[in-house]
Amino acid sequence: MKKIIYHNSLSIVFILLFVGAFAGQIFFGIQEYNKDLVENGGHIVTLYEYFASGHFLEGTFENWESEFLQMGLFVWFTIFLRQKGSSESKRCEGEEEVDREPSPNRKDAPWPVKKGGFWLQLYKNSLTISLFLLFIASFILHLYGSLKDENTMNLLKGKATISLGEYLQESRFWFESFQNWQSEFLSVFTIIVLSIFLRQKGSSQSKPVDAPHSETGE
């Protein structure tokens, strides 16, 4: 058991951090939503009702959307773009281990590699595809939740509800999206550039402490 925990400690810690932060979002989110409802003449909702509300869906998926977009673009761009000196980039010259063609004869190769054909082609791009599919799903759920929350507030204020097409012409949804996208792009830019000059001993995201600034890759 100790070995299993050690071998999976990085993912275990981050999923626990996610659960804790998600619980905090729900705890404070329902309080904020109920406060808005009461102020606008509505009634307090239960936790179950909150999970189906636009407030919860919009607040959750607008953040997931930007994360998956950032990671998908980062994985894809690092195939052919370079940053000299960054630990987040491949070397500027020559091919690396990740560029080699997969061999079905390699020991313990995943089954799509052994299968070949369509499954191999799909598997070769499966990480990027999965991240972009998660982005699209989150984008749609964010849009649905944001529209639902907008119409909930419109009803409470005695205003008419609006259609999806009308909402897409409004500023709220796009403001929610772009404010998250810009922060994700800034965070990627920051780690790319800072890893040129700064180090963290023992981290897989850093170059060795004694590596020159011009050395590219981990």
Image (tube, helix red, strand yellow):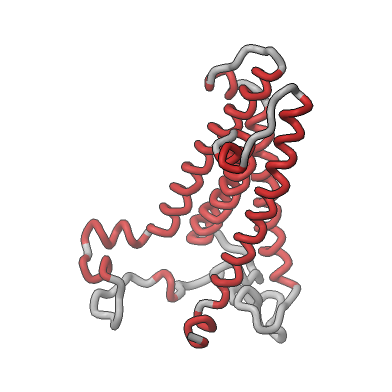
Residue farthest to the right?
39
Vertical placement of 157 versus 65: above or below? Answer: above
Q: Is residue 29 left or right of residue 147?
A: right
Q: Position of residue 84 (x, y in %)?
A: 64, 68
**Looking at the image, which is closer to me, 153 or 71?**
153
**Looking at the image, which is closer to me, 142 or 90?**
142
Q: Position of residue 59 (x, y in %)?
A: 64, 41
Q: Position of residue 19 (x, y in %)?
A: 60, 60
Residue 108, by quadrant, is bottom left
Q: Is residue 140 left or right of residue 43?
A: left
**Looking at the image, which is closer to me, 131 or 27?**
27
Residue 90, by quadrant, is bottom right
**Looking at the image, which is closer to me, 137 or 84?**
137
Vertical placement of 167 versus 209: above or below? Answer: above
Name the residue rendered at 62%, 72% in the picture.
87
Name the residue rendered at 69%, 28% in the picture.
43
Q: Count the numbered circles shown.
A: 0
Vertical placement of 104 versus 182: above or below? Answer: below
Q: Is residue 50 left or right of residue 118?
A: right
Name the residue rendered at 41%, 52% in the picture.
129
Name the residue rendered at 61%, 39% in the picture.
50
Q: Position of residue 123 (x, y in %)?
A: 33, 61
Which quadrant would the C terminus be assigned to in this image? Answer: bottom right
